[in-house]
Amino acid sequence: MHYGHSKTTMLLSILAILILLSACQSKLPSTPTATTPTIAAIDTPTVVVTVTYDEREIQQRQQEVDQGHFALSISDPAYTAMNYLSNHFSDFGKVEKPPRILKQIKDRVAVVEIESGGKKYIVTLKKLARQDETGVWFVTRIEIVPIGTSHSTKTPTP
């Protein structure tokens, strides 16, 4: 087999896939979509995805939760992270270990680690609409690291 793809080609392919997945997910009203996925890599196998939302998406999701939908989006950042990964990453499969919350700063920021498919997903979540117990968790950053390698930051800075 020949593995002649450059890192740039691979990153561009990943970016195209993420944009395509975002476009497909935008058809589902209850799932907020990444409006600006940004992928960055430093000379490591680590991939970093930054997810942003427009204000309308944030308020719509918060309103859905206020109406009683998606209750776990309020209380459980690990559930929200797994749900986001399964909806937006086609290679995200069986979770190999229970998710670990690496950091949680009151009701504002959480960092969750999930292992699946030989990769470690380090997911940063923030409460963008309300920073209290009624606020919805939103995925804002995902660091994807092959298991067995170290990631670029020990715990992502929120």
Image (cartoon, rainbow, N blue to C red):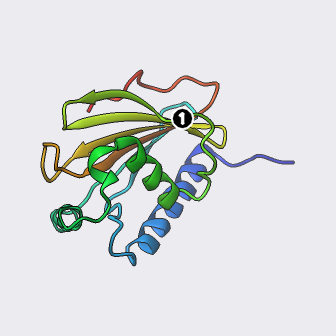
Name the residue: 30% across, 56% down: 71
In this picture, residue 7 sits left or right of residue 73: right
Residue 88 vertical position relative to residue 48 in the rendered view, above or below: below
Direction right: furthest residue: 1
Quadrant housing residue 115: top right
Residue 150 vertical position relative to residue 158 in the rendered view, above or below: above
- Counting labels gives 1
Quadrant housing residue 70: bottom left
Query: x and y percent of residue 139 in the render?
Result: 34, 48
In this picture, residue 17 sits left or right of residue 60: right
Name the residue: 30% across, 35% down: 110
Label 1 amino acid? Pro
Residue 35 vertical position relative to residue 47 in the rendered view, above or below: below
Query: x and y percent of residue 108 in the render?
Result: 19, 38
* Circle 1 Cα neighbour tier, 10 Å, few/some/many (<14 / 14–19 / ≥20): few
Direction bottom: furthest residue: 27
* SS type, badge 1: loop
Query: x and y percent of residue 132 in the render?
Result: 13, 43
Which residue is under mark 1?
98
Image quadrant holding the C terminus, namely top left
Query: x and y percent of residue 155 in the render?
Result: 38, 24
Front residue of 40 and 111 = 111
Name the residue: 12% across, 49% down: 130
Quadrant housing residue 123: top left
Front residue of 7 and 25 = 25
